[in-house]
Structures are given as structure tokens and as C-alpha cells.
Amino acid sequence: MEEADLDELEWMACQQFPPEEDEDYYDGYEEMPPPPEHPPETDRIDESFSHDDSSRKRPWYVEDSHDRESSGNAVAVKKHRGLLSDPAGTSSKKSLFIPGTVLNPPTQNTVSLRTSPATFTKGSPIPCTEGQPLASVLAADPWTLRPPPATEEVCHMSPRNQEEEYIEVPEVPTSCKLPRRCVTDIDGDFIPITGLDGDRVYSAKVEPVKANYNLTALHNKDLLGEPIAKMIERIERESFEQVIAASDKKMLSADTIGTVPASEHEDLWVDKYAPRSFTELLSDEKTNREVLRWLKQWDPCVFGSKRYSTSEEVLTSLRRQATHLHGNVNMGGRGSFNNNVNKSMAYRNDTFNSDSTRKVATEEKSTLDRPEEKVLLLCGPPGLGKTTLAHVAARHCGYRVVEINASDDRVATTLQGKILDAIQMKSVTGDNRPNCLVIDEIDGALSGAEGKGAIDSLLEIINADKKSSLGKENEMQEGVTKVSSKKTGGSAVRRLSRPVICICNDFYAPALRKLRQVARVHVFVQPSVSRVVSRLKYICGKEGFKTNARALSALASHTECDIRSCLNTCQFLNRKKQNLKTLDVGSQVVGRKDMTSSIFDIWGEIFHKRKVRAGSGMRGLVEMPEIGNQDHKEFVRRYGLFSNHGDYDLTMSGIHENILHMRYLDPSLEKTVEALEWMGDSEIFSHHIIAKQQFHLLAYQPLPMIAIRGLVAQQERPQVQWPKQHQNSRTEQAVKMEMLNSWLGSMTASISRALSPVCLGLDIVTPLLTIITPPTIRPVATQLLTSKEKDEIVQLVDTMLGFGLSYRHPKAGMLKADHGIDGHSSLTLDPPIDTLVKYKEFTAGYRQLSSTLCQMLAHEVEIERIRREGALRENKMIAVNPTPKLTIDAPNKKDEERGKPPLQLVEDPLQPCDEKIEVPKKMCYISSSKKSVPEQEKPQPRRSMNFFERFKKSTQTDVTADVKAKEKLATLQRDSRPLLYKYHEGLTNAVKRPMFVRDFL
Amino acid sequence: MLWVDKYRPRTLDKVMVHKEEATNLKNLIAQGDCPHLLFYGPSGAGKKTLIMALLREMFGSSAEKVKVENKPWKVEAGTRKIEVELTTVSSNHHVELNPSDAGFQDRYVVQEIIKDMAKNRPLDVAGNRGFKVLVLNEVDKLSKEAQHSLRRTMEKYSAACRLLLCCNSASKVIEAVRSRCVNIRINSPSRDDIVDVLMFVAKKENLILPPELAGRIAHHSNRNLRRSILCLEACKAKQYPFTADQEVQTTDWEQFIVGLANDIVTEQSPKKLFQVREKLYELLVNCIPPEVILKRLLDELMKKLDSELKHEVCHWAAFYEHRMQQGQKAIFHLEAFVAKFMSIYKKFLINTFG
């Protein structure tokens, strides 16, 4: 995209790096040091002044008085202003500072400008002679030459705004109260000014300066575009630079220099030299830019909301937006700002080249909405500047940062409240910049159970907003006024109207899983060592800490470019009046970061043997002190690594699951055996630790891992898989065990009491499956079976019932569908004990019954079960109450039976037979009134005796259920009541009346 | 109803395989009282049958009227309340339960529930035995803590209750508990015993069972009576009338292990080991206890092994089984055994055949 390309160009130019060996060079400008002289925030001006005065009274450089003064307050700045008049080579170096790097508070700028307007004019024409790269960039400065959207995301407000301020402010007398709140107060041209705090004021333009300015702006070759603050700063830096240059030379030649007394109460260097502006950020430029771009996408939503109140405001905010988009909009749009929006747009389209038209259109559209992803998720190892980036970028875009970090209470409700506060509220302290919510360390404290709730609440806000966004958009397009009213109403819907930045270390933290899907994610990578080193050098130079480039780069690579730890180390050593030497880095003097690595790093460490680095360059130097006892060092390092991670169980299962895929030379599997033995040891050990609660023994857990590493580590990069197998099998086993237990529970007590779940699986299942699937049963109508076969079926049903088995459809809800597709094919055993003999590439010994048989059996089992229950109940009733009580259950049972109406119809011929067989049994139940163990009676002679009789009866049955029931009742002659029972599938027009189940059998 | 249950001897007189133990038991309770008993022996030997017959002997046929209950117990353990769900099989005179079902909370089961049961003397003492019988299954799976808490219960409430403990391995029952019981070892019935039983069942069922087939069934069932009767019934379901050379069905998991052993012997490599691991997982998933897998696998491997390796392999099998008992993740040790076997076998092959 063009846009992106432009950004690229711009940024490359801004952040170009010097070749590292050129010491002078880096000192000059390339490292983009922060301007520590200027207090960063507007609201802190007063304090910072006083603070600076008090805290930095002491000289920083003994040798040079200039430096002492340059130590960092505005007073000093003024004193040095005289230097501006000498446009020496040093100052030209300074010109390489990018406009916009420094976000100076307007008030301060005003002061400095007022005191020396002359210096400004003098200083301004300083050409950028020496710093070629920047000069060339400025020549092609997209801010001035390119269409507005090109700079949409980057550095939108600082350069020009400041410039304007610097220009306008001196011209208008202070008595005028130069900045106006309303544009209408100013006649003639005006210029909007946005303070850091989001304040917008307008000031009239005054000709002479404007001419001057226009010249510079339009021609653009002129470097007056540079803010005055830069120049001041440049001068200050010039002076201390000389010192640094001098001291650096010394430092490089010898490792030492004259001592610098450290101040008694100094800030942490980390804070003191924290990046104040966007361009000072050390983090990856691409990430920075992306973050900024994302934040800028909120502009229409956040800042655009103001403009809807009046047409004036519409105009001004639009203008302001334009200012955001391209710093120098004033040169083009100046004349047209009194017109309405469309005109202004049109004007802009005219002024800028034509391709801006498209941009403007899209931009206008985008004002209606926010970025696609409402949340930004920054992740990366500590110390790379994630938090700093979030803060700087948010401030850069004119937000007030509201931070929620791990120290805050972050349960769901609190977090939700805070988010809503941040979205809807404004600060009462007069800082009326919109809020930008930064949730720091979201992975750490939010990983618990309550943390999940917190993330859920965050997601809820995001998603709730998504749902309503469609409707909203329509509303928005309807009219400006309506939207303005909606703004108040919008809070009720809890629309996420402010950017939210989340920061985490571990991208794969389970708590973040959902958030990852909706957020825009930026993963931080380590900045290059040279970049860190140059910054460190700058700071060390400023602090008078003696070191050299090698030691610094060793330090940086040692800490994995964690600038925070580098700075802390340096400061620490500085206070101890020690110097950072290369040799120190590997030793105890410089603490190693206690960093937990991800589990994949651990596995990588175990399976992957890094190549022994040829001792080249800095690396070699770092490792030099370790040469003596390399093995020991490595051991200690690994021990630390493994024990820091801590999840030995997971680590071990990862090893176990992956070890067989590793390609280590092991012809007779000795290494494998040994590794497995180590694993076994570790496993026994951990079991012991947990069982005996001797957790201090955990200290020995990393050792097996180290041992295994020694066996299997290869130089080849391994592909480590997340271990699932063990867990999966555990869950499956638990499921099956549960199934066995419940199966055992569903058996008849007399059978189950002699069994245990384990022996069910071991001994019973296989024979049982064979027994209940005899090949002898023919899938024919029951009438056609011989009496022997019938006996067999009865026995089979009895067995199945005793073991609590039946055939079911896999899911009751699937019943209909199954019938629709192919009959009743999918009957399975319930409980599904056949899964117990399922093995891969193995067919179990039992044979599958045909579906018809299954159905028949299921039916028989069901009937038998109901009948037994009925008999049991009857027995009880007889025992309790001689008059047969009406059982409510009976119709329900009937319903259950009716559960498969088509089945019943199909099986109808079978039913009478079944009935025939069972009737005597039932009689038997009744007669042997208190026998609760049904297995005991099986009067075979009786059954056979009744056989023909029953057969005769069965012929009378009809196909339809009601007729059959009626006939049955009639033949049974037991019940005098007429049965009115009609069943239509899907309708319940059956006449309900109390009934015994046996009546239907 | 399966033959296993159908022909289970219901009284001590009818017991076929452990006649001596049965007579002893009968004499033991002849006086109307009995000490605590600990039945131990392998699965399928007849422990439960004996216990049930004993109960019947003590309380008459009403001891056979059992009901199964599955109810949650609330146990107060110090400050917290623990809910344990236990399945009990109980008659008027006795309660059977499996305290190890409660897992790591078995201690509370023993301390509270069993104690509670033991405390309450049966109310209807008139005419009945003045004590209650608690049958505890799988005592060897109880944790040591639970077993220790059992000691006191056994002594303190011995007036009101008798404990019948049942387990597979007495070595996992602590000494203290063992010494408080009369230990009754129920060993696996001999092959001849099994054949006798099978013939008896066949006779009752009016089947003609060739003795060869009965012998083969007994052989395949590994001296497990339950399995052999089931096997007989399965054979009958598959093919009747019997023939002497009829195929005897072994259980599926055994067949699977046979395949596994074949795999191991055919190829020894990490790749194969990985496949073996998957199969082992499958076995474990299907609730086959790892000790059984190891033992069975060893059996199968032994068949294919050169005699000079047998001793070594047995040694290692014992070694890894021991480790398995110490640990928790059986797969590690099973796999280690397989790897060890592969290593030994491969070295042997290389040495022998070059």
C-alpha cells in the first residue's frame, strides 16, 4: 500500500542507524537520545522544574561546566541559548533530529520562545548540511508533499502543532489571551493548537511570522520546520556531546575515566531515561507503527465525537482531524476553514493531489466506526518496552492513559467497572483528554479462576459492542444531530468507545485464549543489540558511567536485550562505583534475569543441542569466562531453566511423548532404555513427593531431565508436539471406568455383588458379548421359532436384564432421523460395553447381531423389564394394600413402551408370543408373592404347557395398538374395564386412565 | 442368568473347589461367632463365593436378600465437610462396600462411615446374631492411612461387628490389619478342579462336554474359575454340540496382547516402540490393569524367547513391575520394559546372527 510505503520511508529515515564502529557518529545523533531536559508531561511542568532543580543540582561532569548546566532543566536551557548563535558543525548535526520527536508541553515552549524570539529566527535557517540522510528525507517530506492520509498514523500532531505554537505565540501579545476556545472569537485566519492533554485552542495568525512560516513550510527545503525545542535541545546536547566525545575517546582507549560522583538520590535510570516520545522508542519500529496506526484508527470515534454538537465544532474537529492526519494541513486548508465541512473537504481535495480524494472518502467512512479489532494485545518478554510503547503511543495520540496493572484488584466486576469508567468518564482534574485503557500484565494476575471472569467481562464489553454496532452504524449515517444525542445514550449500551491496550508476557497463557481471537496482536521481538547498546551508551555517557561498547553489548546480549535490566545493572554498578567490564557480564556481578521460559523452550532445550558457537565477536567474549568449567555452567543454567519453569509433570510427559520421534543414534535402544528409566525414576519420585507431601524433594526433579538431555539432545531442530496422548488416554480410561461402575450398578444385586469393575473388564465382557450374541437365533417372527429357540431367547433376555443390558439407539433424539434414513440400523448396546473390547486393527471375537435381532431383543428386554417392575410393584401393593391401587406410573410405563411406535408395529407379530411366554411367569410372580429375586423362578414345564394355548390367543391380535390391547384384555378376562386407548403419533388424544402395565403385555 | 451365577454354590456344603476352606469356615462359625476374616487370593478363585456362602451359613437365606444402594455420605473431616459417594450392597445382617472407591478420601470412609456402621449394633437382636458383618472389598487398594485407621475400628467395635476383608494380595494389607484377622488364602483352583466344575455345569445343563475341551478351557482361562465357566458358556453360544477341538475363545485383550508381543519380537526400533506405546495406551484405556498387561505380555514374550534370555527378561519384568507399583504412570514403566526387552533381544540377535 502506498500509505504503508510512505510510512516506511519516513521511518527509515527517522530511525536510521549508524554503523556501529563509528563511535563519533552514534554520539552525535543516531541513537536518538531522549531529551531528558524537558519534563515530559504538561501537567507535571511545575513539579518537574522544581524537581529538576533540587535533584540535579550536582554536577554531572566534573570536567566541563557546560555539562553541569546542561544537566537538565529549563533554566539551563536558557543559559545555553547563546549557543544557538553559533551554527557550527555540531549544531548541524543536531538538525538531524526529527521534527516531532519531542512532545514539549506548550507552556514551556511558550516561555522559551518568548524569551528568545531572535534565537529562533537565527536558528531556524540552519541548514541540514551534514546529516545527509535526514536532509534528503526532509526534502521529500511526506508531510508537506504528500496527500494527507499518508501520515495518518504517524506523528500526526507533534511537529506542526508545535511549530505553529512557536510561531504564533510570540507574535500575539499575551494580553490577548492568545489561545481561544472558539474559533469565532478570532477573525481572520487562525490555527488550531492541540496541547498534549488534548486541549484545543485556536489562535489567530499574524502575518509576518506566517510569511516566514509559509516560506518554510511550502518550500519545505527549509528546515525551519524543526521545532524550536529541538534546536534548544540540540544546543544543549552539543555541549555535553563534546564532553562525551572526549570521554568516549578515553573510555575506548582505557576502560576507565575520571570518577563521577553519583547523586545521592537519583531516579532509577529506567525511569529517568524512559522514552518520552514516540521516536525514542527502542522497540521494533514496525510494531510501534502498527500500534500507533491502530490507535489512530480510534480517532474518528474518540475525537470525532466532539464535532457533532454544533456545526462549528464539526468544522473545527474536522480541521483538527486534518491536522492529525497531516501536520501541515494549515498551509492548504487555511483559507477554507470558515466554510462548511464539505467545502473544506473539497478544498482539501483541491489543494492536495487527486489521490487524496479516495483517502478522504475512506477516512470519512472510518469516522463512523472504530478499528476492526477493538483491543490491542501486546506480548513479548519483559523489558522490551511494551508498557512504554503503550504509554507513549497513547500519549502521543492525545489520550490520557488509565492503567490497570497486576497490583490492582482485577476481579471481573472491578475490571468491568474500571473499563466502563475509563470508557465513559473523564478526569475531573481538568485533564480532559480522552482515556486510553492500558491493562498491564493481563496474563499474570488474570490467569486464575477469577481472572477468567475478568477477561470474560472484557470480552463481553467488546462483543456487546459488536452486536449493537450494526444498528448503530445506520443510526450514525442518518444525521449528525442524532448521533450527538446518541453519544449520551451510547454509554448505556456500554459501547467500547475508547481504545484498550492489553499487555502480556506469555502469549499462550490459557486465560488469554478468547482474547487472542478478538484482539489485534503484536508480538514484540528483541530489538537489535546495536540499538540497545547505542541507547545504553548514550545514557551511560549522560550519567558518566564508564564503560565501553563491548561490555555494553555483552550486557545487552546477556540480558537478551532487556533494556530495563541493562539499565538497572548499569545503575547498580554506578552506585557501587564500579565499571562495567566485559568480564563482569558472565559473572555474578551482573544478575541473570530470573525469567521463566515457555514449556516449548524447555523441550527445545532438552532435545536440541545448540551448535558450539565459533567464538566470534561478542558472543565469544561473553562466553569467555565460562570456558573453565563449561559443563558445570551449562548444568547450572539448565537446572535453573528447568526449575524455573516448574511444571515437571508436563515437561516429562512432553519428553515422553516426543522422545521416540527424536533421531538420536541408538542402534540397540540402550539410550532409549536409559531415558525411559530416567522418566520412570522421575515419575516414581514425583509420585512419592505428592503422596508423602515432601515437596522439598522437588528440587531434584530437574535432574532426570538434564540426564535425558545428555542422552538424546541432537543438533537437529526438533519438532516438539504438545503432549496429549497421556492425558487423552487418562480421560478415556476414566470415562470407561465410570461406565463400568455404572454398569455394575445397573446389574442385579445378586450378580453384581460378586464382581468388581476391573474383573468386569478383564473376565466378563468378552464371553458375555459372545453369549448375548448367539449365532443360533434366527431373525424371524417369534411364531416361527421352536420352543427351544424361544427358551434360548428367554434366557438371553434374562441374562441381558440381569446384566442391565439392552439395545438402544445411540441418542434418543436421533430416533426419528434414523428411521428416516435406513430403518433401524444403529441399535447399540447400552451401556456400550462393546467399546471395552475395541482395539485398533483388531476385530473382537463376538459377532454382530443383525439390527432386526437387536430390535427384537431390545423389545423383549424392555417388556420383560416392565413386567418385572410391575410384578414387583404388585407384590408390594399386595403386601401393603390388598385392593389394587391405581398406579400413576402405569401409563408412563406404557408411554415408555410407546417410545418407539414404529418399532412396535413392526414387531407386532412377536408380541403375542412374548406375552405367551411371560404370562405364566407373571402369574408365578403373583403367586409367589414376596419373591423379589426374579431369577429364581423359571418354571419350564409350565411354560411349555401353556405354549399352544398362548399361540392360539396370539392369532387374535390385530396390528393396530388399540385393537390389540382390547383383544388382549378380552382374552385375558382379567379386567372388566373397557380400555379406550388410541394412539396417534404426535398427538396425545389418548384417554388417560389408570392401568396396569401387565394389561398390555 | 449366566452359568457363573446360576451354579455358584450357595452354601458352604455345596462348595466344589475349596472344600477344605469351606469346612474350616463352617467349623469356625459353628459356635455362632467368628473372628475377623481376611480372604485373599487371585481373581476368579472363589473368595466372594465363599464369603456369600459364609454369610448364608451365618444368617440363613435372608442374607441373600440384598439391595444395592448408592448414596452420598457426608463426612466431617476436621473443619471441612467431605462428600463421598459409596455403593453398598446390604441385607438385614450385613453390609458390603468397597471403601477404596472413595479414592484418596478412603481414610474418611474408614474413619467415619465404617466406624459408624460398626458402632450400631443391629437393633433386632432377639433371635438374631448379636453382631453385624461388614464386608470390605479390595482392602489392598486402601491407602495405608485408611488401613491404619481400620486397626482401631477392628479392635474397638469387635463386639458389635465382624469384618470380612477381601483382597487380591495380602502383601498390600498392613501387618497390623492382617494380624487382627484370620487369614484365609483362597488360591486359584487347580486345573483339575476347574475341569470338574465345568463337567458339573455341563451335566446340569444337559450338555455333552468332551473332557479335552474342558481341559483346554481350563488351560486358557489361566486357572480362573469365573473365566472358565464364562468361556464354557461362550463356547456353547458359539457352537453346540461341542467338539473336542473347538476353538476356545480367549478374551479380546489377551488376543490383543498376543499381537503386541508379536510386534515387539518382529522389530526393535524406536518407531516400533512408539506403536507399541499406542497399543499399550489402548489396553490401559480399556481398563486393563497395567500389572495384568505386564504379566500377560511377559507370558507371551516368554513363548517366543530363547531359553538363555528367559531369566534376564523375567528379571527385568519383575524390576519394572516393582517400579510400576511405586509410581503412578504405568505407561512409563510398561514402555520401559518393552524398550528393555527390545534392547536385550536386539543385542541377542546381533550377537547370535551377526
Image (cartoon, grey):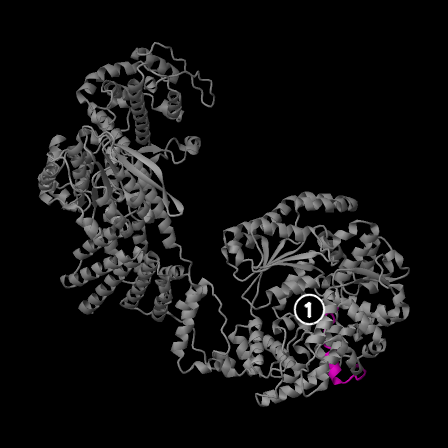
Picture coordinates of residue A663 (x, y %)?
36, 67
Residue A99 is covered by the magenta coloring: yes
Front in this rendered view, residue A699 or A851: A699
Dividing the picture into quadrants, the one containing residue A7 is bottom right
Q: Quadrant of the N terminus of chain B?
A: top left
Q: Position of residue A362 (x, y in %)?
A: 72, 54
Q: Residue at x 66, y 88 (%)?
A: A246
Q: Is residue A294 left or right of residue A557?
A: right
Does the magenta segment cover residue A369? Answer: no
Viewer-closest of A63 and A15? A63
Left/right of residue A30 with respect to residue A915 in the rendered view: right
> The C terminus of chain B lies in which quarter of the figure?
bottom left
Disc 1 residue type (three-letter): Ser
Instruction: From the viewer's side, name the closer residue of A766 and A856.
Output: A766
Q: Residue at x 22, y 50 (%)?
A: B173
> Quadrant location of residue A795?
top left
Q: Where does the magenta region start and end?
A: A84-104
Q: Is residue A1 visible?
A: no
A162 to the left or right of A927:
right
Q: Main secondary structure of the magenta part?
A: loop
Q: Farthest top residue?
A: A976
Q: Quadrant of residue A561?
A: bottom right
Local packing at callout 1 (Cα closer than 10 Å; few below 14, some 14-19, many 20+) is many
**Residue linked to disc 1:** A277
Q: Position of residue A611 (x, y in %)?
A: 43, 75
